[in-house]
Amino acid sequence: MATVLLLRHGRTTSNATGELAGRRPVELDDTGRRQAARVAERLRGLPLAAVVSSPLIRCRQTVELALPGVTPELDEGLIECGYGEWEGRPLKELAKEPLWPVVQHHPSAVTFPAGESMAAMSARGVAAIRAWDERVNAEHGPESIWLACSHGDVIKAIVADAMGLHLDQFQRIVADPASITAIRYTPTRPFLVRVNDTGELGSLVPKKHDGERPAEQSDAAVGGGAGGGV
C-alpha cells in the first residue's frame, strides 16, 4: 500500500513568540525557512506521487522551500484546528483558562469558544488523509509514496487514529516543526513507520524552564509548539 509522509510546517513567528496561531495568516520565521530548506535535502530523490497541503500560508511556504517547483493540491481537511477566540493569544495566558486542563486530558470533549471541536478536527483530518491515500494507491500503485503538509494537532490526531488510540490520548504524541511522520495504510490496519523525525538529535535535549512547575512540564503544547531545535 502507499505510504504517506506527514510534514508539519516549519517554525512560525507565532511559534517563536509562544502564541497560538490558529488559522491566522502567520508565516514562517527565519528558523522555519531553514528547517523547510533542510527538509528539501531529506526529500531529494523520493518519487512523490502526490503533494497535498493545508491551504494556510505557513504550510504552502514549507512546501515551496521543501519541494521547489512543486505546486501542492490544497485540502481544507488538513487546515489547522479552528481555535476560535483562543487564536492569537499567548499560550501562557491560555494555560490559565478553565478549558486548558480539558484540552490536555479530555480533548474529545473540547469545543473552542466560537471555534471548532477537537473531535471534528480529528475526523476531517483523518478522512482527508485516508481519502488521498486511497486515491494515490489506486492511481499510482501500492509502492507509491506521497506527502501531506499540515499542522501539529492535526498530525497528532492522524497518528492517534493510525495507532488505534482514543483522541484523549493524542496529547502524548509530538509533532515538531518540519518533522516527518510516515504512515502506511493497509486493508486491515495502518502501520506507523516513522514519527516526529527531524533528522537530528539536538531537539531531544530537554530545555531549561526556570520556575516552571512539574505539572506545567507535563502539559502538551496546544497547536504543536515551537519544537526543541533551531
Image (tube, rainbow, N blue to C red):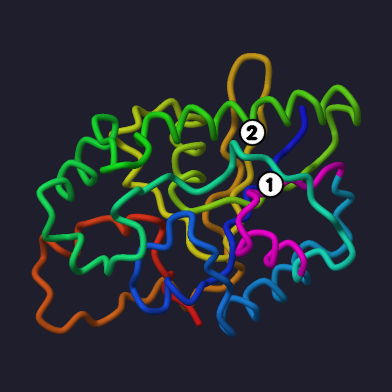
Q: For residue 226, which quarter of the picture? A: bottom left
In depth, the one of 214 and 21 nearer the eye is 21
Q: Is residue 137 left or right of residue 58?
A: right
Residue tagged 1:
148
- The residue where tag 2 is placed is 129
Q: Is residue 138 left or right of residue 207?
A: right
- The answer to which quarter of the image holds residue 207 is bottom left
Q: Which residues are magenta?
A: 49-64
In the rendering, at what x and y percent does residue 134 appear? 75, 23
Three-letter code, disc 1: Ala
Q: Amino acid at mark 2?
A: Ile
Identify the residue at image location x=31%, y=37%: 169
The answer to whether residue 51 is magenta is yes
Residue in the image at 68% along x and 22% along y = 186
Give 101 or 88, whichever is nearer the viewer.
88
- Given contact means CB atoms under 8 Å apart, are the residues at marks 2 and 1 in contact? yes
Q: Nearer the viewer, residue 110 or 137?
A: 110
Residue 101 position within the rendered picture, expressed as x and y whole percent measured from the top left: 14, 47
Q: Report the side of 45 relative to 223 (left or right).
A: right
Q: Nearer the viewer, residue 169 or 55?
A: 55
> Residue sitting at 77 percent across and 27 percent down?
1
User: Is residue 24 positioned above or below 72 on the image?
Assistant: below
Residue 87 image-quadrant placement: bottom left
Q: Give residue 112's position: percent from left, percent from top.
A: 28, 42
Q: Residues within 10 Å of mark 1 (few under 14, many from 20)?
A: many
